[in-house]
Image: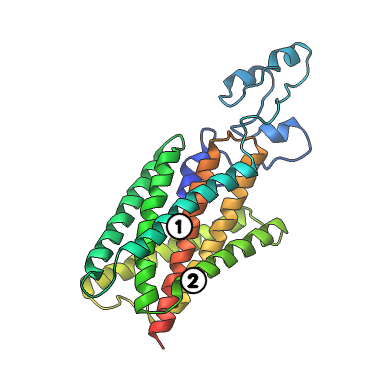
Amino acid sequence: MRSRNPVFSRRGFSRDNGYAGFNTAPQAGGPAVATQGNPYAQPTGDQYAQNPYAQNPYAQQDLQHGAPPQAPATTGRMTIDDVVLRTASTLGVLILTAALSWALLPIDDANIGRSYGIGIGAALIGMVLALVQSFKRKASPALILTYAAFEGVFLGVVSNIVDNRIADGAAMQAVIGTMAVFAGVLIAYKAGWIRVNRRFYGFVMAAALGFILLMTVNLLFAVFGGGDGLGFRSGAMGVIFGVIGIILGACFLALDFKQVEDGIAYGAPREEAWFAAFGLTLTLVWIYLEFLRLISILNSND
């Protein structure tokens, strides 16, 4: 089963054999569990040579003695430290460029149009870079960090406008809210309070598709009909859909945690940690923007 995150679902931990982590999660039962549906497995016998990720220098010796080949030390395999380090690097670049754009792009009446245009342009470039990386077979650290830089410019401009013109302190509130959601979902996931299985995945995907469809229709009505469209992003309905968006983001985090956990357990190559960092950054940006939008709606209704 795959996360809704395009990075994990199209590449990364679901490549080649259609890796379905929720069906074949590794257990301590034996080698059959570890190899079935796992593109990173260390198979036995003739299957060993067919696995592009199997690099066991002791395989030939083990096979001659009739024993299953044993994986070498975890050198070259992704660890949680790799994921944390690369995620911190990606978010660090995003936060740095957001701070610079906040400080250097004025939003006074004479310059707000130019600054907002730069922010929207950066968002479009970031979206293109995200799509390019999502369809690449291998993670490109330079591409991922460049995406983070442009996304940071967009977030810096938008956050500055909301914070200074709509709701004082909105950016910090959105940051705190995002951190709280991340920490809460991580604790709940590690404690086993969130069970990521097929039913959970199906529910999240159905809710996400419905949410995106409604927001798209609302945007089209707003563009061609003017005003707030169908009102899904303003007033009481805007608050409801803002909360739904944050809840969906939390669900996406749980799916991403599951994918990262299974990738580590299956022995994914170390470079896959960049995919994890990229996907987690996308989800955190989603949650932050939903918080910022919700705070804007609540303050505009005061």
Foreground residue among 246 and 179: 179
At horizontal 72% and vertical 58% (from top left) the residue drawn is: 192
Rendered location of residue 148, percent (x, y): 42, 51
- Residue on which disc 2 sits: 172
Q: Judging from the image, what secondary structure is the residue with disc 2 in?
A: helix
Residue type at the position of mark 2 = Met
Q: Residues within 10 Å of mark 2 (few under 14, many from 20)?
A: few
Question: How far apart are labels 2 and 1 at the CA level?
Answer: 13 Å
At horizontal 38% and vertical 46% (from top left) the residue drawn is: 146
Residue type at the position of mark 1 = Ile
Foreground residue among 177 and 149: 149
At horizontal 68% and vertical 18% (from top left) the residue drawn is: 45
Number of residue marks = 2
Q: Judging from the image, what secondary structure is the residue with disc 1 in?
A: helix
Q: Which quarter of the figure has residue 102?
A: bottom left
At horizontal 66% and vertical 21% (from top left) the residue drawn is: 56
- Residue on which disc 1 sits: 95
Q: Is residue 129 above or below residue 50?
A: below
Q: Is residue 239 above or below residue 189?
A: below
Mark 1 or mark 2, which is nearer the start of the sequence? 1
Q: Which quarter of the figure has residue 117?
A: bottom left
Rendered location of residue 126, percent (x, y): 35, 51
Task: Say left or right for 41 vs 290.
Answer: right
Foreground residue among 139 and 223: 139
